[in-house]
Amino acid sequence: MKKLVAIVGRPNVGKSTLFNRLTQSRQAIVTEIAGTTRDRQYGKVFWNGREFSLVDTGGWIVNSDDILEDEINKQVNIAVEEADVILFVVDVRNGITDLDTEIANMLRRSNKPVVVVSNKADNFEFGYQSAEFYALGLGDPFSVSSINGSGTGDLLDHILTLL
Ligand code: GDP
Ligand code: MG
């Protein structure tokens, strides 16, 4: 059976950009407005002669922070249930937010392998800053830039070891 990797994280951290980078597609909608991926988007990733499925989860445009949190919790729960590996995307330019901590707490309670992906590390200085995400209690973060692709090869190598 084909393995499934899920991308989770709060809105605007770059989940859809990472999805597009890893699937080399323009499938997922990327925008400046937080929460614009309305549906769960599935794609395929090919790396080093192997293949796995990738799912991008979305936030929804809502007015209330509470509803937003509920939606994210729902998406994280679905991801934990259906995926073999979870990519937890955070934004190195923002550091750890309350919502990141909440998602981390949910993921730590799951028995699934989780990879913390410190996105928007477009240059090496941001790479150093990624170390702070170790405090989420989910292991060493992987620094990537979904925009310029740096770090994504190492991330893919690591994902394959978990599948
Ligand atoms: P999502 O809500 O988590 O799916 O986030 P999106 O993929 O829609 O991206 C949100 C914003 O972050 C967009 O303006 C992206 O261009 C930007 N973004 C995503 N990845 C990167 C990155 O690696 N570096 C930088 N500088 N910006 C990024
Ligand atoms: Mg999105």
Image: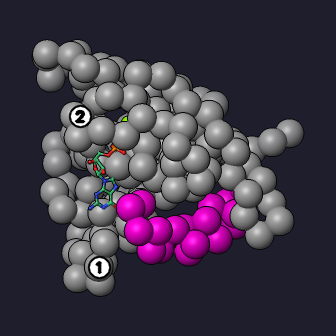
Which quarter of the image is occupied by the N terminus? top right
Residue 99 drawn at (x, y percent): 22, 39
Of the pair 115 and 123, the residue shown nearer to us: 123
Assign ligand 2 to one image quadrant.
Answer: top left
Horizontal placement of 12 versus 37: left or right?
left
* Extreme-right residue of the structure: 1
Q: Which mark is residue 14?
A: none
Above/below status of 99 relative to 149: above
Q: Residue at x 61, y 50 (%)?
A: 23
Whether residue 150 is in magenta: the answer is: yes
Mark 1 residue element:
loop
Instruction: Report the residue at 13% width, 16% height from top.
Output: 64
Q: Dot 1: within a 10 Å radius of its alpha carbon, few (fewer than 14), some, or many (20 or more) residues?
A: few
Of residues 112 and 94, the one drawn nearer to the viewer in this rendering: 94
Q: Which of 116 and 56 is in front in this view?
A: 56
Give 128 or 84, whichever is nearer the viewer.
128
Gap in Å between the C-alphas at discs 2 and 1? 23 Å
Q: Which amino acid does label 2 sit on?
A: Ala
Span colored in magenta: 146-163
The disc label shown at residue 34, or none: 2
Could you tell me residue 97's position as x and y percent? 17, 48
Horizontal arrangement in the rendering, residue 44 relative to residue 69 (left or right):
right
Question: The residue under label 1 is which amino acid type?
Answer: Asn
Secondary structure mainly formed by the magenta segment: helix
Query: Which one is earlier in the sequence, the residue at label 2 or at label 1?
Result: 2
Q: Residue 123 carries which label?
A: 1
* Quadrant in the rendering for residue 125: bottom left
Vertical position of residue 102 compared to residue 134: above or below: above
